[in-house]
Image (spheres, rainbow, N blue to C red):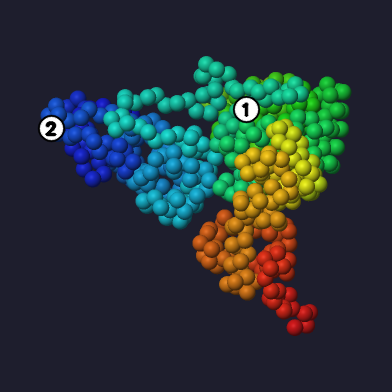
């Protein structure tokens, strides 16, 4: 194995170089991004030749016995490449040629599920783009945060950065701990995309009405989150049930049963986990399913929990199967079993754990395996909020932010928030900025209307993409029925984006119905867009027509 090379640059070809090290010339294939970094280096047969250090990936298989060296200027680029070649149908040469853009940009595209960007890379077609997103989603956060600013002449190779739980053990500082108001301590473990990032289904962070949390909103959301059941607004049935369970556990000196919270993004699943920890005056440890790649990672997390701590796993349906099976005995018996040695010397060792409460959150409960689902003692579905509840939330948030808001202004923001607290708090920030710059700082109904119209949010809570979707069906397909692929082609967008980002809310408010023949608009959509309603909307004829 050849892990790194340092020597004189003897030849530069179209896609590779010859690097002489101790009198031996090594042919090294370079990805396009590395070739651009080395453009200024001189190649030659004498001492004029530039000195270069590369970290390398050595590839040789039974089908391809001739070894291939692929070079990189940083360990981070090499590590991303090695993740990329784990994707189905991605060979080393295809993956290397695809690295024509900075690794940080490609990783960010994977994180936001931008298949269109991935298809623009050399050698990446539609199927490969889908495979990359499916297999690397949630595993490239560290690369998305990196910036491609390596100098042309790379320094000597660094040792790979520690990954996963081991990285936290090797660092001199302890994991970030935050003292929450109310007594509980919050400790954040690595999460997909950074702390407090919700790795939700399709990323639609560019939309102001997205229910997925943007990375820059983490600190803002934490500031506004309720810390107790008294402060929590909405979800009365779930809150009342959890209040009883927590109080009973406190009186008995036990930990709360394991809790599964499911529902659309942005409705308060993470907040409820924090409230449970605060009410129990224990530590909240947060992580996410995609961040726990191996059983050893989970074992390290569980071993560091103290008595009655609350472990919150977001997107729990995305746990790898091997990790999920390790979780079964931990939830039931507060112990984990692992095997040492091999063959006739194999031994099973039971490792005892502190009693803890697992709070799992998911947007797709149907993807949970039955054995995992049955080990939860408490189940609660979080539903969309009413306008009255959202008005209370936006009023409370405004008081925390020090913004003055009139009741009509709060109601106007709540009305356009799609029944989601995360969206109402996001809109509040935009309206607060508008009131500060174009008003006297007071958020009135008029100010809220002007600010949200400027943001492209109409009174029904629809944004520009929603309206383009509706108008395309009305103007080009006479209200439907029409296939989603046809609509996507008409408005120059992707069908998967429309299915995940646009259709759910239009179905919820009754503007759209799905039929075997395709999507069809209802009368309410015509009225909202002020379009003449057809005498008979297709698919809505009389009974005997």
From the viewer's side, name the closer residue of 231 and 15.
231
Crowd around label 2: few <14 · some 14–19 · many ≥20 (10 Å): few
Residue sitting at x 33%, y 41%: 33
Q: Quote the CA–CA distance across marks 1 and 2.
A: 54 Å
Give the residue drawn at x 66%, y 69%. Answer: 520
Question: Would you identify the image quadrant in which residue 7 lies?
Answer: top left
| Nearer to the camera, 507 or 335 | 507
Most extreme residue toward the front is 440
Within 10 Å of the Cα at label 1, are there few (<14), some (14-19), or many (20+) other Cα atoms? some
Q: Image height check: is 381 above or below 355? A: below
Relative to 293, 411 lies left or right? right
Query: In the depicted view, which residue is nearer to us: 185 or 536?
Result: 536
Residue under pointer 1:
188
Rendered residue at 31%/29% (across/down): 154
Residue 45 has which mark? 2
Which residue ends up furthest to the bottom in the rendered image? 545
In the depicted structure, whether residue 355 falls above or below residue 218: above
Query: Looking at the picture, how far across and down is residue 67, in whole percent?
Result: 29, 39
């Amino acid at each position: 194995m050849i892990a790194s090379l340092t020597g004189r640059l003897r030849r530069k070809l179209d896609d590779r170089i010859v690097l002489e090290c101790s009198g031996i010339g090594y042919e090294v294939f370079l990805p396009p991004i590395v070739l651009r970094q080395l453009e200024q280096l001189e190649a030659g047969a004498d001492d004029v030749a530039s000195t270069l250090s590369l970290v390398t990936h050595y590839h040789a298989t039974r089908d391809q016995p001739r070894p291939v060296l692929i070079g990189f200027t940083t360990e981070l680029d090499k590590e991303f490449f090695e993740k990329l070649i784990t994707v189905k149908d991605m060979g080393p040469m295809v993956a290397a040629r695809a690295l024509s853009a900075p690794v940080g940009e490609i990783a960010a595209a994977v994180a936001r599920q931008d298949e269109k960007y991935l298809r623009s890379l050399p050698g990446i077609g539609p199927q490969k783009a889908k495979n990359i997103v499916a297999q690397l989603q949630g595993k490239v956060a560290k690369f998305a945060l990196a910036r491609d600013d390596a100098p042309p002449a790379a320094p000597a190779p660094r040792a790979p950065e520690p990954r996963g739980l081991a990285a936290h053990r090797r660092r001199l500082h302890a994991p970030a701990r935050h003292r929450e108001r109310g007594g509980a301590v919050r400790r954040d473990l690595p999460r997909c995309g950074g702390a407090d990032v919700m790795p939700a289904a399709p990323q639609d962070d560019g939309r102001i009405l997205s229910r997925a949390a943007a990375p820059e909103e983490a600190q803002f959301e934490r500031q506004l989150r309720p810390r107790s059941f008294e402060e929590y607004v909405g979800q009365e049935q779930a809150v009342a049930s959890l209040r009883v369970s927590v109080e009973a556990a406190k009186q008995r000196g036990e930990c709360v049963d394991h809790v599964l919270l499911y529902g659309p993004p942005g409705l308060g699943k993470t907040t409820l986990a924090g409230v449970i920890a605060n009410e129990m005056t224990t530590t909240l440890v947060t992580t996410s399913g995609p961040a726990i790649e191996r059983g050893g990672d989970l074992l390290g997390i569980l071993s560091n929990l103290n008595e009655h701590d609350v472990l919150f796993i977001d997107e729990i349906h995305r746990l790898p199967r091997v990790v999920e099976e390790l979780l079964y005995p931990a939830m039931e018996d507060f112990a984990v079993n692992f095997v040492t040695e091999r063959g006739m010397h194999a031994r099973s060792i039971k490792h005892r754990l502190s009693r803890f409460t697992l709070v799992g959150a998911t947007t797709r409960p149907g993807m949970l395996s039955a054995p995992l689902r049955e080990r939860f003692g408490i189940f609660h579905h979080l539903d969309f909020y009413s306008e009255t509840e959202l008005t209370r939330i936006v009023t409370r948030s405004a008081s925390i932010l020090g913004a003055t808001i009139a009741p009509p202004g709060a109601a106007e923001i709540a009305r356009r928030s799609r029944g989601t607290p995360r969206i109402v708090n996001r809109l509040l920030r935009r309206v607060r900025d508008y009131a500060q710059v174009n008003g006297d700082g007071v958020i009135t109904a008029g100010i809220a209307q002007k600010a949200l119209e400027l943001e492209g949010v109409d009174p029904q809570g629809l944004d520009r993409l929603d309206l383009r979707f509706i108008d395309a069906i009305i103007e080009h397909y006479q209200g439907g029925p029409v296939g989603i692929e046809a609509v996507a082609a008409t408005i120059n967008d992707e069908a998967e984006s429309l299915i995940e980002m646009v259709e759910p809310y239009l179905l919820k408010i009754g503007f759209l119905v799905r039929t075997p023949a395709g999507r069809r608009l209802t009368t309410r959509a015509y009225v909202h867009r002020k379009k003449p309603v057809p005498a008979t909307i297709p698919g809505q004829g009389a009974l005997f027509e």
